[in-house]
Image (tube, helix red, strand yellow):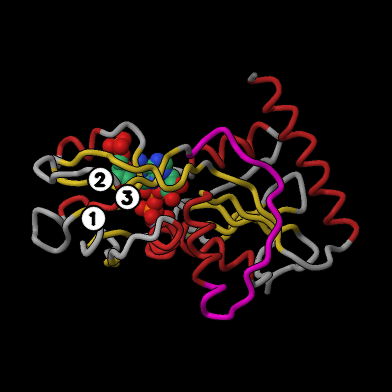
Amino acid sequence: MTDNSRLRIAIQKSGRLCEGSMDLLKAIGVKLSIRDRLLIAHATNLPIDLLRVRDDDIPGLVMDGVVDLGFIGENELEEKMLERQALGKQHQFQTLERMEFGGCRLSIAVPNEFDYQGAQSLAGKKVATTYPYLLERYFKEQNINAKAVMLNGSVEVAPRAGLADAICDLVSTGATLEANGLEEKEVIFRSKAVLIQRAGDMPDAKQKLIDKLLTRINGVMQAKE
Ligand code: PRT
Ligand code: ZN
């Protein structure tokens, strides 16, 4: 049974946001006894439970009110928000804090040999991405008649495999694009990790705990400036 009086925080189990989220929780004094592979970790000094899941599941867990807080990349959050909006599902949440980790950009890149003269060169083309809603929104805003092709992995090899003419993927150093003969042309979204809270009423004790954690987070972030 889950204990509803404890604050439930969703974090990525493993991956690029995991270390940043765990380091921050540690820095604000949340003591954990994490055993690998366990879905739930209980804090030993505060009424907090951590749910360790895939990052893709975090926006939905918060928007469905299954957890109280979540650490998530804005790219994933915005994509899931647009998807849920389109499907008529609950998509409310509140952003509490933008973090200093998880920074990246979502960019359109084309093969080196692509004669690129600006975004309109994408008209009539297929663009492979894991973020079809963000990409379609960009096409709409820019009035470009192009097609987003959904791929959950290996996006960067899609042009070489003949699956798409261009890609739209996350970039941090640019090394992956370069290694695959691709050139970054348009940044369509800039992202960092954020801490979000579910919509709806929060019991007083939980809200007080959230406020306390936020004060500590701000302290940690200021100390780093
Ligand atoms: O298993 P799970 O579903 O939880 O993890 P995941 O594999 O879906 O996600 P993960 O851990 O790769 O990324 C989680 C989040 O980290 C993303 O949603 C972003 O918010 C953030 N982030 C920051 C990044 C990157 N930087 C990043 N560089 N996510 C992915 N990448 C990938 C990118 O897709 C490409 O393959 O790294 C490659 C490019 O890196 P560079 O340095 O070569 O440009
Ligand atoms: Zn994921």
- In the rendered structure, are the residues bearing label 3 and label 1 in contact, judged by CB atoms less than 8 Å apart? yes
Residue that label 1 marks = 155
- Mark nearer the N terminus (2 vs 1): 2
Residue that label 2 marks = 109
Q: Secondary structure at mark 1?
A: helix
Q: Is residue 15 visible?
A: no
Instruction: Residue 154: name its quadrant.
Output: bottom left
In the rendered image, the quadrant that contains the C terminus is top right
State the image coordinates of residue 215 (x, y, percent, origin top left): 80, 36
Under 8 Å from ligand 1: the CB of mark 1?
A: yes
State the image coordinates of residue 163 (x, y, percent, origin top left): 14, 64
170 drawn magenta? no
Q: Closer to the observer: label 3 or label 2?
A: 2
Residue at (87% x, 50% y) in the render: 208
Q: Secondary structure at mark 3?
A: strand
**Residue type highlighted by circle 3:** Asp
State the image coordinates of residue 171 (x, y, percent, origin top left): 34, 40
Relative placement, left or right, of 81 versus 180 is: right
- Mark nearer the N terminus (3 vs 2): 2
User: How much space separates mark 3 and mark 2, taking CA atoms?
Assistant: 8 Å
167, 16: nearer the viewer: 167
- In the rendered structure, are the residues bearing label 3 and label 2 in contact, judged by CB atoms less than 8 Å apart? yes
Under 8 Å from ligand 1: the CB of mark 3?
A: yes
Please tell me how crowded label 1 is: few (under 14), some (14-19), or many (20+) other residues with Cα within 10 Å: many
Please tell me how crowded label 3 is: few (under 14), some (14-19), or many (20+) other residues with Cα within 10 Å: many
Which of the labelled discs sits on residue 169, or is there none?
Answer: 3
**Residue type highlighted by circle 1:** Val
Which region is colored magenta?
84-102
**Residue type highlighted by circle 2:** Ala
